[in-house]
């Protein structure tokens, strides 16, 4: 797959029912086990109008599907969260901050180029997805003009150094117009917020695609489960005795890259940068000792915490994780999860299935669709309580 398909596309939609009524299908539980491994097992149909184009306002007015037992769920509103958790529980959040990673440039010939930054490698050298990619071979030049007027800012340029086989992208060396500056420092003048391609009619401003607790610059997509929190809601949670701790996972291509292999267990995740501090590890251990529960705010927090515990025990970690969580995974840290509704055939759908079970999750998705929930990045949320996990 070329990098062009990562920009502006999402997987096809087929029905859950069709997967379970095919002639000659395996008897249960062998059929379910096979579908757990099969890419086709993670399809569902979604009406186009239920793809949220704008976030709920205020943020905590989003709807919340609460899974509180293996067989029961309720419909609430996100601001009800303090009443749904227990004093002594710990919410773990991702404090990454989205950078304006989408740049529109042009070649010397005048042809337009779209660039989506993925990650900095060193000294203003970045891995990026480019469109059209096939025409940008090593040595090609790209030029960018500022969209925000700043007297000290001139045009920005980049040179294609090489092709990256793992992503289909390009490694770009940027020449910064301000001596000694980094690309991050001038991105506000040249870049735009990288909203997902299925958000096509949004009136949201850039601040609405950041969590209220975003701090660490580096993500190219928001950790969307956290978009529902407001400062007031965070204060109410604290007053209720519900703690909070932070990790950093810079959301990148590993999170949103489509799964393409039919046997999902062979999917290879692209590494994403993670930091789980000693302070957060101690907060988690203290919560567990006191009988509290660890509730991850988003799938990125799941990957960060479980990645930091791959040795068998949670410990401070700073580096990249390519952990891929799918049904059959043995959870080490995370007990509950707040998450949005995810695209079909995505690694995120597989991660949530590992916590609650694939068929249960797809059944809940059908309930959410029938109840007019809003889906994807600006959509509504689901709370999976520890008592609602797969038995």
Image (tube, grey):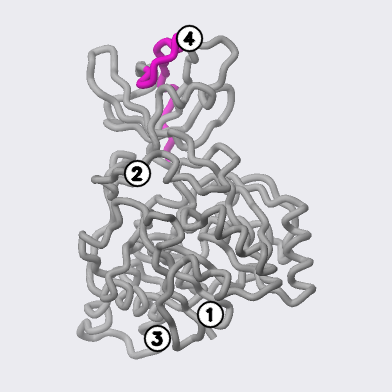
**Alpha carbons under labels 1 and 4: distance apart:** 55 Å
Q: Label 3 vs label 1: CA separation? A: 21 Å
Of the residues tagged 3 and 2, which is closer to the observer?
2
Q: Position of residue 293 (x, y in %)?
A: 66, 73
Residue beneath disc 2: 204
Of callouts 3 and 1, the N-terminal one: 3
Q: Is residue 308 left or right of residue 298?
A: right
Q: Earlier in the sequence, mark 3 or mark 2?
A: 3
Residue name at image x 24 percent, y 60 percent: 12
Give the magenta range. Answer: 146-165
| Residue 152 numbered tag | 4
- What residue sits 33% from the left and 62% below the top? 375
**Disc with the residue nearer the chain's start (2 vs 1):** 2
Query: To which quarter of the image does residue 13 belong?
Result: bottom left
Q: Quadrant of residue 285?
A: bottom right
Q: Between residues 334 and 370, which one lies in front from this camera angle? A: 370
Q: Is residue 355 left or right of residue 8?
A: right
- Does dot 2 land on a helix, a strand or a loop? loop
**Of the pair 260 and 359, the residue shown nearer to us:** 359
Q: Earlier in the sequence, mark 1 or mark 4?
A: 4
* Residue behind mark 1: 389
Look at 74% across and 72% down and name the residue there.
Answer: 288
Can the viewer see residue 123 in this picture?
yes
Q: Main secondary structure of the magenta part?
A: loop
Q: Which residue position is annotated with label 3? A: 30
- Labelled disc at residue 72: none
Under circle 1, the secondary element is loop
> Which of pointers 4 and 2 indicates the residue nearer the eye?
2
Front-lying residue, 354 or 140: 354
C-beta proximity under 8 Å, tags 1 and 4: no
User: Which quarter of the rendered picture does the C terminus lie within?
Assistant: bottom right
On the image, the x and y values in percent for residue 71 come to 45, 88
């Amino acid at each position: 797959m070329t990098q062009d398909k990562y920009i502006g596309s999402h997987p096809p939609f087929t029905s859950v029912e069709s997967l379970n009524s095919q002639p000659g299908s395996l008897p249960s539980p062998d059929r379910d086990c096979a579908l757990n491994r099969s890419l086709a097992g993670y399809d569902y149909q979604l009406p186009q109008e239920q793809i949220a184009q704008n976030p709920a306002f205020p943020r905590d007015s989003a709807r919340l599907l609460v899974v509180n037992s293996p067989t029961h769920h309720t419909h609430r509103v996100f601001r009800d969260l303090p009443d749904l958790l227990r004093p002594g529980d710990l919410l773990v959040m991702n404090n990454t901050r989205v950078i304006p990673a989408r740049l529109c440039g042009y070649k010397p010939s005048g042809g337009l180029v779209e660039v989506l930054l993925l990650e900095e490698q060193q000294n203003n050298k970045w891995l990026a997805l480019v469109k059209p990619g096939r025409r940008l071979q090593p040595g090609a030049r790209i030029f960018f003009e500022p969209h925000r007027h700043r007297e000290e800012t001139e045009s920005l340029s980049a040179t294609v150094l090489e092709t990256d086989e793992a992503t289909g992208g390009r490694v770009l060396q940027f020449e910064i117009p301000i001596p000694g500056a980094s690309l991050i420092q001038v991105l506000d003048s040249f870049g735009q917020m990288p909203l997902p391609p299925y958000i096509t009619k949004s009136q949201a401003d850039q601040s609405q695609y950041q969590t209220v607790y975003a701090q660490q610059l580096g993500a190219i997509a928001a950790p969307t489960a956290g978009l529902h929190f407001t400062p007031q809601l965070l204060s109410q949670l604290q007053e209720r005795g519900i703690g909070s701790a932070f990790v950093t996972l810079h959301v990148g291509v590993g999170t949103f890259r489509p799964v393409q292999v039919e046997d999902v267990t062979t999917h290879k995740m692209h590494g994403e940068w993670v930091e789980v501090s000693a302070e957060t590890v101690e907060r988690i251990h203290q919560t567990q000792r006191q009988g509290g529960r660890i509730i991850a705010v988003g799938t990125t927090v799941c990957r960060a915490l479980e990645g930091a515990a791959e040795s068998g025990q949670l410990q401070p970690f700073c580096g990249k994780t390519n952990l891929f969580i799918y049904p059959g995974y043995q959870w080490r840290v995370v007990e509950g999860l707040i998450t949005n509704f995810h695209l079909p055939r995505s690694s995120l759908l597989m991660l949530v299935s590992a916590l609650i079970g694939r068929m249960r999750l797809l059944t809940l998705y059908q309930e959410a669709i029938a109840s007019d929930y809003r889906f994807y990045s600006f959509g509504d949320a689901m709370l999976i309580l520890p008592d609602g996990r797969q038995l």
